[in-house]
Amino acid sequence: MQYQVNKKENVYFIIKTIVTILLLLLIVLSIPQIFEFKNTATVATVVTFALYLVIIVLFLLFQKVYLIAYMKGNGINVSQNQFSEIYSLYLTMCSELGIRKVPKLFIIQEGGLLNAFSIRFSGSNYIAIYSDVFEMIERDIDTLKFIIGHELGHVKRMHMSKRFWTILSSVVPFLTAAYSRSCEYTCDNIGFSLVNADSKRALLLLAAGKKLYKQVDSDAYLADAKMNNTLSVKIMEYFMSHPYLPKRIRNIEKMDKDKV
């Protein structure tokens, strides 16, 4: 299946890779010199820095293990025996994307939040759909398919693995967030390619909620967003892992026009 990769995704990934390699070389070349230091304060500083780094890595690892444990412990595993219709669609989407090792799909209840996420640990991928999103199976299954397709996009593009192996590049301000935003555009494109329907609805769902999203005038929403795009709004986006929803909707509209 063909889909469009956001042009900035590969650029940012190359930059992250180069930065990571340079930092690793710097660390390797610095190790002999560190052991030559006779200054106790300098050695103590290096050891303290390394200790903090280990603590941060262990904390991130704990967060990931905790999240997967929570998902497996409380979530509902979508399978042939549980929501089989959706599971069949899910397998079809995986096949269309060429994903051979099908990620486990879970439904989790998060008190009305509208979200979904993908996570990778110990060589396996997992996808979780919040129950209030999964409820769209009853009224707008294409919206649900788009959201699932978006998460499968992260698996297809190996975004989780790429972020892990280039984690050292996070020292560069705004680089990781910029890469993440470009990945979100790519995954929207993949979701769009998997659904033969108006994919904007799924993004409007995230903006207005499942009761109001069909009443939103998307043109007015985009016009208001353009008017509200002040300097502070533009600056704050540099810190965000996801693009603003109006930008993602414009991207889908462009994809739709190009398709025609």
Image (tube, rainbow, N blue to C red):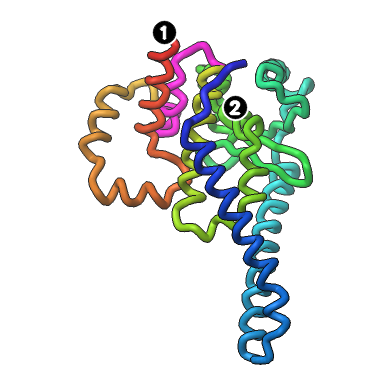
Please tell me how crowded label 1 is: few (under 14), some (14-19), or many (20+) other residues with Cα within 10 Å.
few
Magenta highlight on residue 209? yes
Q: Which of 131 and 31 lies nearest the eye of the viewer? A: 31
Category of crowding for the residue at label 2, using alpha-carbon neighbours closer than 10 angstroms: few (below 14), some (14–19), many (at least 20)? many
Q: Which residue is mark 2?
A: 148
Residue 236 painted magenta: no
User: Horizontally, is 137 left or right of 254 in the view?
Assistant: right
The quadrant of the image that shows the C terminus is: top left
Q: Is residue 104 left or right of residue 166?
A: right
Q: What's the residue at 58%, 50% (across, down)? A: 18
User: Could you say which is closer to the camera, residue 215 or residue 161?
Assistant: 161
Residue 250 placed where, x, y %? 36, 26
Residue type, numbered disc 1? Val
List the residue tagged with mark 1.
260
Residue in the picture at 56% in, 49% down:
16
Q: Nearer the viewer, residue 54 or 214?
A: 54
Label 2–label 1 contact, CB within 8 A? no
- Residue 198's image quarter? top left
- Residue 197 is labelled as none
Magenta span of residues: 194-211
Numbered disc in front, either 2 or 1: 1
Q: In this orientation, which residue lies closer to the viewer: 169 or 181?
A: 169
Vertical placement of 183 versus 94: above or below? below
Q: In the rendered structure, which disc, 2 or 1, sits on the residue that comes first in sequence?
A: 2
